[in-house]
Image: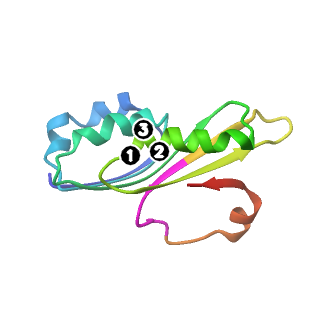
Amino acid sequence: MRRLYIEWDGLLTVKSFIEFFERDVLFSLMKFTLFATIDSPHFLRYLLPMFSSQCLYSFGVTWFVKTTVSLSETSKILLDTFQKLKGSVPIELELSITDMSGIENMYFMTAITIPNMKKYLDVDSYLDKKTVSG
């Protein structure tokens, strides 16, 4: 197998990913693409070192953290996440804060390789969310 494209429905964890692929399969890839909701950024930190230096990879992943976060903390969260995910491919990070009454406070983090793979822009969603990009 030389190319692998995964669009995963549901939550993708390291354990579920390991059940499908062994390290030697990933190391032999020349091209890898992943679109998924993952359980944490640790998933990417686990996955990226498994590729050979010749593998072209791209991803568009989202995860969420249930915690109260203030706007003043967003820079630190983005910087820490960027440092953890820094690799050979440039990435774009987006942090969206959810603060709805009756719903637990949380933030969503999206990491996308550059050039951005999104081919569309939902204007209503873009204008409605509280987002910090970096």
Toward which corner of the image does residue 55 lie, by quadrant? bottom left
Residue 74 covered by magenta stretch = no
> Marks 1 and 2: CB-CB under 8 Å?
yes
Distance CA(mark 1)–CA(mark 2): 6 Å
Q: Residues within 10 Å of mark 3 (few under 14, many from 20)?
A: few
> Marks 3 and 2: CB-CB under 8 Å?
yes
Query: In this figure, which residue is indicated by the disc labeled 2?
Result: 82
Decide which of 72, 66 is in the foreground and name it.
72
Q: Is residue 54 above or below residue 19?
A: below
Q: Is residue 131 above or below residue 12?
A: below
Query: In this figure, which residue is indicated by the disc labeled 3?
Result: 84
Read off the magenta span: 110-118
Q: Quadrant of the C terminus?
A: bottom right
- Given the image, on which type of amino acid does mark 2 rest? Phe
- The x and y percentages for residue 13 are 42, 33
> Marks 3 and 1: CB-CB under 8 Å?
yes
- Given the image, on which type of amino acid does mark 3 rest? Lys
